[in-house]
Image: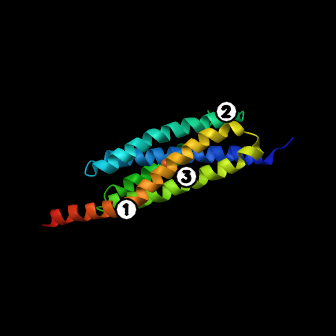
Amino acid sequence: MPNTARDIFVVGLRNAHAMETQARELMERQSERLDDYPEVKAKVTAHLGETNEQLKRLEQCLEACGESTSSLKDTAQSVMANAMAMAHSMAGDEILKNTFANNAFENFEIATYKSLLALCGQAGVDSARAPLETSLKEEERMAAWVVSNVEKITLEYASREERKAA
Ligand SMILES: [Fe+2]
């Protein structure tokens, strides 16, 4: 018997897995170059740890749906994330661009988890609810941190540039 909600849910889990893999690549590249911004570096590094757990949770959800996790096609997107991070690495205002990108990315992740949570019941995978809610809360905390630190990071960047120019 076809189960459309379940199919949509499984595709959503796979897309979320690709998204988190991309997030991990972006944060790994960022954290390597954040020595001038120790507070941001600490936050990105902590969220990198959370992201690894989120990937495991998504794999567990896929397994609960009877799906194999061995064939997850995340490679192409990972390569793209790397290329994006490298393209940024020469820009003087990289810290700002990364902050804006992180704001966008975290909100994209929030929408993704909300969408998956909306489908749990209809998909008949109630066991996925708790792990997806845990991940959603982590994304909400990270998104809130990013957006509430935009001004501070901007002014920190500006005073670094002014010191350089002086
Ligand atoms: Fe995230």
For this rendering, which residue is in front, 45 or 72? 45
- Checking the image for residue 109, the label placed there is 3
Callout in the foreground (1, 3): 1
**What is the three-letter code of the residue carrying label 2?**
Glu
Quarter of image, res 158: bottom left
Report which residue position mark 2 lands on.
Answer: 63
Mark 1 or mark 2: whose residue is earlier in sequence: 2
Residue at disc 3, CB closer than 8 Å to ligand 1 = yes
Which element carries disc 2, helix, strand or loop?
A: helix
**What is the three-letter code of the residue carrying label 1?**
Val
Which element carries disc 1, helix, strand or loop?
A: helix
x and y percentages locating residue 15 in the rendered image: 61, 47
Say whether residue 34 is visible: no
- Checking the image for residue 74, the label placed there is none
Q: On the rendered structure, is 40 left or right of 10?
A: left
Which element carries disc 3, helix, strand or loop?
A: helix
Report which residue position mark 1 lands on.
Answer: 150
x and y percentages locating residue 155 in the rendered image: 28, 64
x and y percentages locating residue 47 in the rendered image: 43, 44
